[in-house]
Image: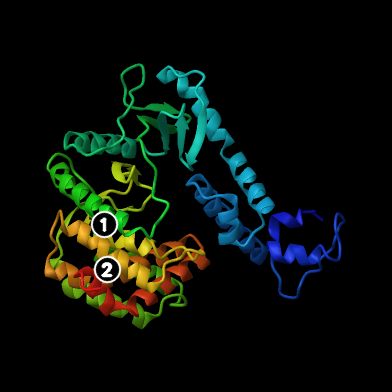
């Protein structure tokens, strides 16, 4: 029989209840009829995903108190989880410390800021890639955007003149750290307007990039009718109903051919758009950049604001105000067509269905369900979304 620490597998509230009866001793819990190792493994997997999500939010700047409120944990439990997650990345940290001399930084101070990115001496950022083609592609995108006057992180070449370094079947790219931080007050309407402007300016620069290199062509509609639908079928329509899916795809298909397609960022959120003293200071992370409908970026950003059920979660009224501000900012730089404005609600719904399908595939049922709830929340205020896009709310 293998003994495990109850604090590693039991929810905080359940552990507290058990501690009223026994502490510091061994407790045998008999198997329930029908209980399988697979079920226990599934619960362990959910805990691992929760801990990974918690750690990412810690790296993004959330305090232990905030994380405790979000995940319903005590601060000691949060600290324990963060410590365990840090230990997982120790090997990557050691690899980075070994290759820093390639940039002449033998004794650089290394601080993790994202699961695959580390800050060096508070002045540089080094990012790990598992794909050589991706690191070369991202380097070229950054160079082209810089030529367009877009603030991006400047690449720091290796001493031998190469743009990146290879080590232990991985590739590492170093860049100068951009000034600024991601936005902490997600409900600030002035910043929402500036985010809309920032997305539009990036789109304008992307049009120039398209002429100078090839990019992956993608289609939200093809994804919806392809792997997304296949995922829901395999899931036997348990999380997303067949009629619900068909209705969303029918609306998207009716307008899709009239929606402008261009290179987009594809992962727009406050963490990838940095601001300093209230002004945009730079863009980061072009790993998912692709050609797709241009309103995808704006819709993805706005649906992302609804994805966290925290104490400061958006009310419908607050979110619609952000929809209005972001689109007003975008249109101050790049006007949208009437067809694009009409398509916004169905594009938002399809993006959340795509997210639900992704989470089903990685066996994160909780987050797949949350994505579906956002779908229905948008569907329930579709006319208000359209009015907000047009600036009427």
**Up-down relation of residue 55 to residue 168 (above or below):** below
Q: Is residue 242 left or right of residue 143?
A: right
Give me the residue at 40% from left, 68% from top.
231
Q: Quadrant of residue 234?
A: bottom left
In the rendered view, would you say 310 is above or below 99? below
Compared with residue 300, is residue 393 higher up or lower down, i.e. above or below? below
Residue 20 in the image: above or below residue 64: below
Q: Position of residue 173 (x, y in %)?
A: 37, 31
Asked whether residue 193 appears in the rendered view, the answer is yes
Q: Are marks 1 and 2 in contact (CB under 8 Å)?
A: no
Q: Which numbered disc, 1 or 2, marks the residue that appears first in the sequence?
A: 1
Taking 13 as reference, is 364 left or right?
A: left
Residue wearing tag 1: 193
Secondary structure under tag 2 reads helix
The residue tagged 2 is 347
Residue that appears at 24% across and 49% down: 198
Q: Position of residue 4 (x, y in %)?
A: 76, 54
Left or right: where 103 falls relative to 108: left
- Which secondary structure lies at badge 1? helix
């Amino acid at each position: 029989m293998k003994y495990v620490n109850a604090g590693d597998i039991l929810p905080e509230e359940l552990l507290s209840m058990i501690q009223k009866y026994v502490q510091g001793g061994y407790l045998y819990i008999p198997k329930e009829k029908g209980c399988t190792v697979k079920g226990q493994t599934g619960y362990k997997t959910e805990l691992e995903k929760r801990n990974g999500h918690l750690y990412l939010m810690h790296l993004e700047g959330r305090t232990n108190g905030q994380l405790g409120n979000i995940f319903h944990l005590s601060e000691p439990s949060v600290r324990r989880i963060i410590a365990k997650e840090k230990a997982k990345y120790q090997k990557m940290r050691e690899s980075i410390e070994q290759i820093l001399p390639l940039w002449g930084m033998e004794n650089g101070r290394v601080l993790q800021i994202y699961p695959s990115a580390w800050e060096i001496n508070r002045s540089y950022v080094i990012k790990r890639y598992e794909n050589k083609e991706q690191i070369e592609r991202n380097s070229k995108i950054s160079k082209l955007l810089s030529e367009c006057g877009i603030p991006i992180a400047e690449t720091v070449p290796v001493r031998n003149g190469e743009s990146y370094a290879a080590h232990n079947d991985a590739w590492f790219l170093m860049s100068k750290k951009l000034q600024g931080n991601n936005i902490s007050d997600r409900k600030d309407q002035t910043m929402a307007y500036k985010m809309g402007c920032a997305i539009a300016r990036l789109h304008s620069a992307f049009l120039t990039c398209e002429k100078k290199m090839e990019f992956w062509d993608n289609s939200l509609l093809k994804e919806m009718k392809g792997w997304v639908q296949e995922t829901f079928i395999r899931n036997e329509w348990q999380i997303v109903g067949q009629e619900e899916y068909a209705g969303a795809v029918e609306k998207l298909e009716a307008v899709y051919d009239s929606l402008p397609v261009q290179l987009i960022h594809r992962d727009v959120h406050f963490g990838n758009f940095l601001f300093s003293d209230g002004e945009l200071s730079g863009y980061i992370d072009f790993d998912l950049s692709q050609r797709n409908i241009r309103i995808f970026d704006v819709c993805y950003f706005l649906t992302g604001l609804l994805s966290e059920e925290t104490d400061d979660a958006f009310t419908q009224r607050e979110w619609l105000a952000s929809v209005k501000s972001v689109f007003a900012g975008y249109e101050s730089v790049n006007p949208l067509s009437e067809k694009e404005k009409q398509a916004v609600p169905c594009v938002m719904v399809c993006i959340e269905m795509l997210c639900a399908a992704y989470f089903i595939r990685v066996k994160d049922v909780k987050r797949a369900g949350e994505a579906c709830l956002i779908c229905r929340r948008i569907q329930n205020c579709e006319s208000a979304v359209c009015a907000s896009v047009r600036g009427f709310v």
